[in-house]
């Protein structure tokens, strides 16, 4: 009987720990979305309704929390990104690539801007951005494989790099923040850029 009670207590502690960790990450993301690109541990603890020490019982430092929040965002977004079949017409692939990437970029923009502020101060955050970029490269390599394969070998790498640049978060941020374009205007620019390059 005691072993059953001990197991139940252990399970309860484990579940509370999972919930507390999720609350910390959720608080961090909420603060980022509200424009605070450098949330403090105290601000996160207050938002999550926990003590300050509890934050550091779950994360070794703020960079570790930053990385965990980035991984959480990725886990939410990747299943939402529409799979773009490689065997449909180019115009349809361009449309799907532009819409799915822009949807994802809108969701990660707050977090990505926070990462840009800290990237060169943290290997963890730098690694998170590298992971995001690798996902983008892998996706475009598959979606536009037909066009890349048809290009002259000397032009292929340049074409791949250009497509990657067009479908990058940095380009999206330039259009949305620096050029102050709407989501649809920004998508139109991306569609036209891809069509001009790949057609």
Image (spheres, helix red, strand yellow):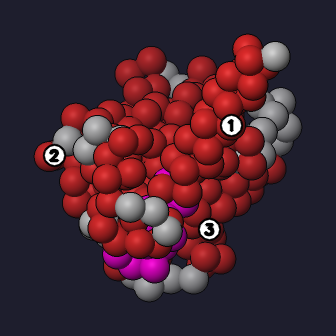
* Residue 182 circle label: none
- What residue is rendered at 56% in x and 72% in y? 186
The residue singled out by tag 2 in the image is 120
Question: In 3D space, how far apart are the residues under numbered discs 2 and 3 (Cα atoms)?
Answer: 30 Å
Instruction: Give the structural element (helix, strand or loop) at label 1.
Output: helix
SS for dot 3: helix
Q: Nearer the viewer, mark 1 or mark 2?
A: 1
Looking at the image, residue 15 sits to the left or right of residue 67; the answer is right
Tell me the crowding category of disc 1: few under 14, some 14 to 19, or many 20 or more residues within 10 angstroms, Cα based: few
Q: Magenta residues, as a range?
A: 25-36
In which quarter of the view is residue 98 placed?
A: bottom right
Q: Is residue 30 above or below residue 2?
A: below
Would you name the residue on which mark 1 appears? Answer: 12
**Which residue is at 20% across, 41% downward?**
122
Residues at circles 3 and 1 in contact by the CB criterion of under 8 Å? no
Q: Is residue 119 above or below residue 143?
A: below
């Amino acid at each position: 009987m005691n072993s059953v009670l001990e197991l139940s207590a252990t399970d309860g502690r484990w579940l509370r720990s999972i919930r507390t960790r999720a609350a910390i990450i959720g608080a961090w993301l909420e603060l980022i979305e509200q424009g605070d690109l450098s949330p403090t541990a105290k601000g996160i603890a207050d938002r999550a309704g926990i003590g300050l020490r509890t934050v550091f019982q779950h994360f070794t430092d703020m960079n570790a929390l930053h990385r965990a929040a980035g991984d959480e965002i990725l886990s939410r977004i990747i299943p939402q990104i529409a799979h773009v079949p490689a065997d449909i017409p180019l115009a349809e692939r361009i449309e799907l690539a532009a819409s799915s990437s822009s949807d994802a970029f809108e969701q990660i923009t707050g977090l990505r801007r926070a990462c840009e502020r800290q990237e060169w101060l943290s290997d963890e955050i730098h690694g998170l951005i590298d992971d995001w970029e690798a996902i983008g490269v892998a996706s475009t390599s598959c979606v536009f494989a037909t066009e890349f394969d048809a290009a002259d070998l000397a032009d292929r790498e340049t074409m791949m790099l250009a497509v990657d640049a067009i479908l990058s978060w940095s380009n999206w941020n330039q259009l949305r923040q620096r050029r102050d374009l709407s989501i649809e205007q920004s998508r139109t620019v991306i569609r036209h850029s891809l069509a001009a390059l790949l057609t």
